[in-house]
Image (cartoon, helix red, strand yellow):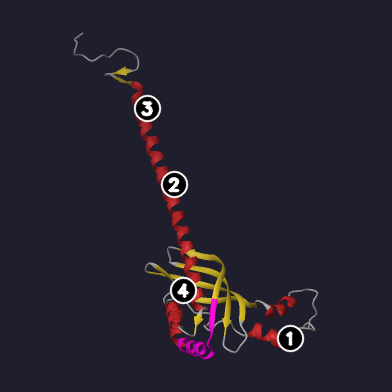
């Protein structure tokens, strides 16, 4: 046998390469590719979930700011308040503001009103990233102070419909959900209505003028809805 002739004898050996390597190598390659695909899928899913979570946080923040802007006015700088609201609005909701902004300005200045809104709870009720649409329920408290009149505080809920305009979410509609619940002294009549043991008529010591003034007077200078 020539010294240059490759060895062919011996179990499991072919031209110096073990036979088992020919079997194992393809399996290793397949397993490696499978692990790579699974890893990419897990990464993609995690990234998608992270993107959705980030968008939920963003629409929640925008909806909260819309409510704060829509229900916060100061007679000393009412034009800035209106500008803040228009900056986070779009579509019909923005167009409607052009119709009632002058009336709001006159009312706020005439009454020397200062109203503030404080958001307490939010919930994303719809989110479609492909369509660029979202809806957020916002619960907030509006506090209104006007010269020569009693202060009014009411708690209410609004549904804010949002559209994605370029790279920003903006409100296309704001609509009240349920009724405004008076807060503070004027809430006494509401509590009595919710008490099963209370009579059908008002309590003897209730002040109708106080209850009516707290429950029926609106707490917000701006309209509560806009069409998409």
Spatial separation of the CA atoms under disc 1 and disc 3: 90 Å
Q: Magenta stretch: dominant SS? A: helix
* Depth check, front residue: 205 or 63: 205
Pair 2/1: label in front: 1
Give the alpha-carbon distance from disc 2 to disc 4, as whole Å: 34 Å
Residue 22 is one of the magenta-drawn residues: no
Is 37 left or right of 174, judged from the image as shown? left
Q: In the depicted view, which residue is nearer to us: 95 or 54? A: 54
Choose the circle earlier in sequence order: 3 or 2. Answer: 3
Which quarter of the rendering shows the N terminus? top left
Q: Which mark is residue 207?
A: 1
Q: Mark 2 or mark 1: name the one nearer the start of the chain.
A: 2
Q: Can you identify the residue that label 2 sits on?
A: 42
Residue marked by disc 4: 171
Q: Is residue 164 above or below residue 96?
A: above
Q: Nearer the viewer, residue 129 or 34?
A: 129
For label 1, the crowd category at 10 Å Cα-Cα, with few meaning under 14, some 14 to 19 and many 20 or more, is few
Q: From this viewpoint, is residue 124 visible?
A: yes
Which residue does the numbered mark 3 point to in the structure image?
24
Query: Which of label 3 and label 4 is nearer to you?
Result: 4
Q: Residue furthest top?
A: 1
Dot in front, 3 or 2: 2
């Amino acid at each position: 046998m020539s010294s240059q002739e490759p060895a062919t004898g011996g179990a499991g050996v072919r031209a110096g390469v073990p036979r088992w390597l020919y079997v194992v190598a393809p399996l290793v390659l397949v397993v490696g590719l499978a692990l790579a695909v699974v890893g990419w899928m897990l990464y993609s899913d995690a990234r998608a979930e992270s993107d959705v979570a980030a968008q939920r946080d963003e629409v929640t923040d925008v909806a909260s700011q819309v409510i704060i802007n829509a229900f916060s006015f100061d007679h000393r700088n009412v034009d800035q308040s209106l500008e803040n609201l228009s900056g986070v609005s779009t579509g019909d909701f923005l167009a409607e503001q052009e119709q009632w902004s002058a009336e709001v300005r006159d009312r706020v200045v005439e009454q020397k009103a200062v109203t503030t809104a404080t958001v307490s709870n939010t919930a994303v009720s719809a989110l479609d990233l492909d369509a660029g649409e979202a809806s957020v329920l916002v619960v907030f408290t509006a506090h209104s102070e006007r010269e020569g009149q009693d202060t009014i505080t009411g708690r209410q809920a609004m549904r804010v419909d949002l559209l994605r305009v370029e790279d920003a979410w903006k409100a296309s509609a704001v609509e009240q959900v349920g009724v405004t619940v008076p807060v503070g002294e004027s809430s006494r009549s509401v509590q009595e209505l919710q008490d099963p043991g209370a009579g059908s008529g008002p309590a003897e010591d209730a002040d109708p003028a106080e209850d009516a003034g707290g429950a029926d007077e609106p707490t917000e200078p701006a309209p509560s809805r806009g069409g998409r």
